[in-house]
């Protein structure tokens, strides 16, 4: 089976590449750059959507968001915790003979030139972590389709920051990872595997994210093995179920609530009633966590 990987340039993306290269011969690795954003862009754009706020409040929220993204972006920037959760190399892609390594600007994955390149390679399966939303034309090229690692439990939480919103909504039973087929929707394709990571009362937002990613990469490897054996079982999602969160939904208030609930012990309270709470949120293709138990 000819396998290609689509991802970005963060530390957890590098781990994804190296971990799957350890287990499978990979024909092509495509690394897409992050969107170009002005230094103040994220905080400012979020605050501009909040009518009726005074200048002082906006500045406080902007400062808070800058600090939040500095502290809780393990994987996207270096953090000492990376070595505790990512066991394969995560700081540098280990380039292997016979594998093509391609770098793209953000969005180029959907351009006609790249489509021609992918048609030339003719991969059987593309495995994705963190790329731009992919257009139907690109999705149609691999003979076996594309599979994605989504850092949330679909369909309950789709879109962005899907490991954080369950905390904001006081629903930590929805922290998890989904490996699914890619279709034209956002995290709506047929599910292959889902898992909840082994959480600890002391987990912070960084450790939760890294546990989700690490479990997701292992699930993706298992999914590849199923596809190689033509034994992958697919579970259609209920299209009307769950919630979709986009970047515009994130705010300083959401981030504050997330951190406050973690500080107040929301994970410990969840673990005390884990069996009952998990039963109320059934998973498709469920497998127990492999790591950190």
Image (cartoon, rainbow, N blue to C red):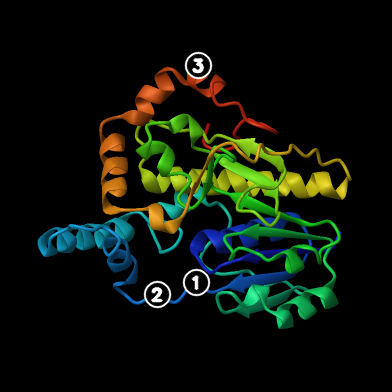
| Residue 89, visible in the rendered structure | no
Q: Residues within 10 Å of mark 1 (few under 14, many from 20)?
A: some
Dividing the picture into quarters, in which one does residue 257 lie?
A: top left
Mark 1 or 3, nearer chain start? 1
Q: Position of residue 120 (x, y in %)?
A: 84, 78
> Which secondary structure, mark 3?
helix
Q: Residues within 10 Å of mark 3 (few under 14, many from 20)?
A: few
Residue at the extreme bottom of the image, as rendered: 113
Given residues 269 and 186, the one toward you in this image is 186
Q: Position of residue 126 (x, y in %)?
A: 74, 61
| Residue 34, visible in the rendered structure | yes
| Vertical placement of residue 116 versus 233, above or below | below
Mark 2 or 3, nearer chain start? 2
99 to the left or right of 55: right
Q: Which residue is mark 2?
A: 37
Dividing the picture into quarters, in which one does residue 47 lie?
A: bottom left
Asked if the residues shown at circle 1 and circle 2 are in contact, with their CB atoms under 8 angstroms apart, the answer is: yes
Given residues 117 and 243, the one toward you in this image is 243
Which of the numbered marks, if any, corresponds to residue 18?
A: none
Given residues 167 and 247, the one toward you in this image is 247
Q: Which residue is mark 1?
A: 34
Residue at the extreme front of the image, as rendered: 52
Q: Position of residue 210 (x, y in %)?
A: 48, 48
Which of the numbered marks, if any, corresponds to residue 276?
A: 3
97 to the left or right of 163: right
> Which secondary structure, mark 2?
loop
- The residue mark sitting in front, 1 or 2, is 2
Q: CA distance from mark 1 to mark 3?
A: 40 Å
């Amino acid at each position: 089976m000819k396998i290609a990987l689509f991802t970005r340039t963060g530390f957890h993306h590098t781990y994804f590449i190296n971990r799957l290269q350890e287990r499978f011969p990979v024909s092509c690795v495509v690394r897409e750059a992050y969107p170009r954003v002005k230094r103040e862009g994220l905080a400012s754009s979020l605050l501009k959507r909040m009518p009726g706020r005074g200048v002082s409040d906006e500045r406080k929220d902007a400062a808070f968001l800058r600090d939040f993204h500095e502290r809780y972006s393990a994987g996207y920037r270096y953090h000492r915790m990376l070595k505790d959760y990512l066991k394969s190399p995560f700081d540098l892609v280990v380039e292997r003979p016979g594998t093509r390594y391609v770098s793209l600007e953000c969005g180029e994955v959907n351009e006609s030139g790249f489509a021609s390149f992918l048609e030339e390679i003719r991969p059987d399966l593309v495995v994705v972590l963190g790329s731009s939303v992919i257009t139907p034309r690109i999705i149609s090229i691999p003979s076996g389709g594309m599979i994605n690692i989504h850092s949330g439990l679909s369909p309950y939480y789709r879109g962005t920051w899907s490991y954080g919103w369950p905390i904001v909504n006081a629903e930590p039973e929805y922290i998890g990872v989904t490996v699914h087929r890619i279709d034209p929707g956002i995290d709506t394709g047929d599910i292959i595997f889902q898992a909840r990571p082994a959480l600890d009362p002391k987990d912070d937002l960084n450790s939760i994210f890294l546990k989700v990613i690490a479990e997701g990469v292992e699930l993706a490897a298992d999914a590849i093995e199923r596809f190689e054996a033509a034994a992958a079982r697919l579970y259609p999602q209920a299209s009307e179920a769950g919630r979709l969160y986009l970047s515009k939904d994130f705010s300083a208030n959401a981030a504050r609530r997330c951190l406050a609930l973690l500080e107040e012990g929301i994970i410990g309270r969840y673990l005390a009633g884990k069996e009952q709470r998990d039963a109320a949120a059934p998973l498709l293709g469920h497998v127990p966590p492999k790591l950190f138990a």
